[in-house]
Structures are given as structure tokens and as C-alpha cells.
Amino acid sequence: YPLVTGVQTCALPIYSPFLVFENMKSTAFQYLNFSESIQEYNKRFYVVTTSAPEELTSHQLEMKEYYTLNWARSSRVQKTYAISSSGLEKIQNMKIPQYWFVITEGWCGDSSQSLPVMTAIAGHSNGNIDVRIVSRDAHPALLEQYLTNGSMSIPKLIATSLDGEELWQWGPRPKPASDLFNSLKEQHKEKEDIYKALHAWYAGNKGQAIEEELLLHII
């Protein structure tokens, strides 16, 4: 589906069902043709971690340490996360197929913890969930439509029907992680200490809070 740019004719009345349907479409859905599969995203992500400095953009070079660390985190989550039995039953019996548009980047620490959980859940959905990645850096205008408390925080998941109607949103963190982050920030902890505690929490929780929050929206 191309970007929706409006109807170029005045022949249709303003109450046209076509116009109403187009207006119901999620902003994220309009980026379907600009999105990647998880396989394409992972390939792009991994290439940054293994490329020589002269092969990277200045931004990639600046962020390479984070790409490399987050690749290791993502790989660990893929090995340690296992969907719960109740979650498996719910996802295998879902009735409404969905696109999951995830706005993210490989340098994002929270994404390294949550994206593998999202893709694992989708993998148990009998094809009913299609995860599509939208680059935050390539398409910042999209994220500006899905701010979190006024900030461009990622990852941000926007779920739509196959026709493009927006169903729900999630991100950038599960509530317990957000509460921990906010608490440590209010205590004026150093940034390094905050993220160390945050990733320790993620490791201990093993993806269960993310799973629970995502599956609240599955019917």
C-alpha cells in the first residue's frame, strides 16, 4: 500500500465510504511498503556489528558499541524466552489477524529485550501476526505520530488489522520496567546505573511481563 496522500478529485462526496475507510487507516499502516520483515531487519542489524569502520555511516560508527551489545542481548533473549502455556493457548486461538508495526533500531537497548519476545509470540500465531519493522532513523516522521509522554521513545508497537485499522499500541517498555526506570530517575541515579538495573530486571523477568501485556490485546 502506498502512502496515503489524499484523493486527487472532487467528484467523490465528502461522506464517501471510501474516504471514511481511508481515514480509519492507521498512520503506521501507511508505511507498510517502507517496512522490513524481521529477517531483513536482523540482517541489517547484524551487518553493522560486523562491518569495518570505513563501511559504516558516521551515525552507525558512533553507535556501533550499542549495536554490538544489543545483538548479544537479543541473541540471549531468543535462547531464554519461552512463551507460557496460557500465552501459547491464547495466541494459537486468536481470531483477528494483525500486522505488528514495530518502530525501532538496533542501537535501542529496550528493543533488544522486547523485540525477540514479540517475534517469538508471532511465531506461535499460525501466521496470524505479521511483524513489520519500521526504521526509526529512516522514518522519524512516523514516530512523531506515536510519541510517549511527548518523547520519541522506542520500541513502539502499533497493531493494525490487515485492512489497516489501528487496534492498539504498546511500548516502549512493560510497566514494571517503566516504574523501575522512573523510580531510579527520581532518585537521581547515574544513567549508567539506571540502565544496568533495568537490564538486570529484564534478565530476571525473562520476557514474561512483555508477554502478559501484549497478550492482553489478543482476542
Image: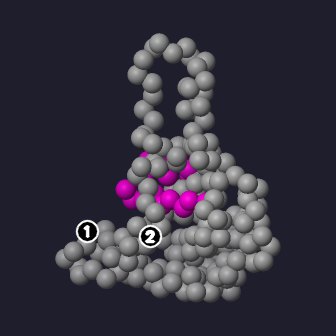
Mark 1–mark 2 CB contact (< 8 Å): no
Which image quadrant for residue 123?
bottom right
The one of 41 and 207 positioned closer to us in this rendering: 41
If the image is split into quadrants, where does the N terminus sit? top left
Whether residue 196 is visible to the viewer of this picture, yes or no, is no
Give the crowd class for mark 2: few <14, some 14-19, many >=20 residues within 10 Å. few
Q: Please give left or right for residue 155 compared with residue 2 in the image.
A: right
The one of 163 and 24 positioned closer to us in this rendering: 163
Q: Which SS class for mark 1?
A: loop
Q: Residue furthest left?
A: 54
Q: Residue at 26% across / 69% down in the picture?
A: 58
Amino acid type at mark 2: Gln
If the image is split into quadrants, where does the C terminus sit? bottom right
Residue 169 drawn at (x, y percent): 64, 54
Image: magenta residue range? 129-150
Give the crowd class for mark 1: few <14, some 14-19, many >=20 residues within 10 Å. few
Q: Which SS class for mark 2?
A: helix
Q: Earlier in the sequence, mark 1 or mark 2?
A: 2
Residue 131 magenta-drawn? yes
Q: Please give left or right for residue 103 compared with residue 149 in the image.
A: left
Report the disc number at residue 112.
none
Q: Identify whether 172 is placed above or below 51.
A: above
Q: Residue at 40% across / 22% down in the picture?
A: 8
Question: According to the image, label 1 marks what residue?
Answer: 57
Residue 104 drawn at (x, y percent): 48, 63
Question: According to the image, label 2 marks what residue?
Answer: 39
Q: Residue at 54% across / 56% down in the picture?
A: 101
Q: Residue at 56% across / 74% down in the picture?
A: 116
Amino acid type at mark 1: Thr
